[in-house]
Amino acid sequence: MVIRNAGIEDSRYLFEWRNDPNTRNASLNTDEIHWEDHEKWYLSVLKNPKVVIYIAEDIPAESSPRGMCRFILSDETNSAEVSINLNPEHRGKGLAQSILHDAIEVFTQQHPQVLELTATIRAENLPSMKIFVSENFVPQRTHDGVVQLNLDLKG
Ligand SMILES: CC(C)(COP(=O)(O)OP(=O)(O)OC[C@H]1O[C@@H](n2cnc3c(N)ncnc32)[C@H](O)[C@@H]1OP(=O)(O)O)[C@@H](O)C(=O)NCCC(=O)NCCS
């Protein structure tokens, strides 16, 4: 499996995975996204150095990619918010943790100034809680059923 930066060719995949009903249930914003809004958003993201999206895929890329991992760099602090979304075809196969792990490794190599990663997860999203905790994220607080976690990279 390889982790690579997302490009314009991934737009349709990201759109479809984002609108998958399970993804919407897990998201803070559960609204369905319209293609026109997605395209506008994605074109702006590709030009925004504060947003890094990685795609995990097989080598050679024989089937659709396995999933994505997104990092949003904060303006004020040396931290970045992480989220993960797997291709629905590849969920429930135990792939998420290695994708999260490898994406964090690539991200921290490319952004050594980042000292902390954060994640925001619905408490009921047990698979997601499990993979982030397995990657050493620590739950900090829970509000309205949403857990804030962090991973200190300084140590
Ligand atoms: C959440 C998500 C990333 C998990 O990926 P996945 O590959 O389907 O998850 P896995 O099959 O690796 O399961 C992760 C772990 O949770 C466990 N798990 C799965 N369902 C569970 C449940 N209902 N209760 C408790 N544990 C559960 C699995 O057994 C596995 O643990 P293990 O490795 O010790 O066996 C994926 O389902 C996804 O993309 N969901 C939509 C988007 C999302 O929720 N993103 C997270 C918000 S940041």
Image (cartoon, rainbow, N blue to C red):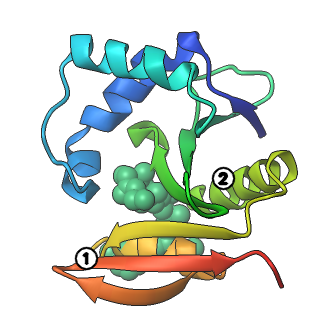
Residue 69 horizontal/vertical position (percent): 57, 46
As drawn, 33 above or below 77: above
Residue 29 in sight in this render: yes
Amino acid tagged 2:
Ile
Ligand 1 is in which quadrant of the figure?
bottom left
Q: Quadrant of the C terminus?
A: bottom right
Is 85 placed left or right of 103 in the picture? left
Q: Name the residue beneath numbered marker 2.
A: 99
Q: Residue at x 76, y 75 (%)?
A: 153
Q: Where is residue 6 in the image (x, y as percent from the top left)?
A: 62, 25
Ligand 1 within 8 Å of disc 2? The answer is: yes
Residue sitting nearer the eye, 65 or 51: 51
Tag 1 secondary structure: loop
In the image: residue 20, left or right of residue 140: left
Let me know if residue 93 appears in the view: no
Q: Residue 124 carries which label?
A: 1
Q: Which residue is depicted at the point 43% across and 28% down? A: 14
The spot of residue 65 in percent (x, y) is: 58, 29
Q: Do the residues labelled 1 and 2 touch (CB within 8 Å)?
A: no
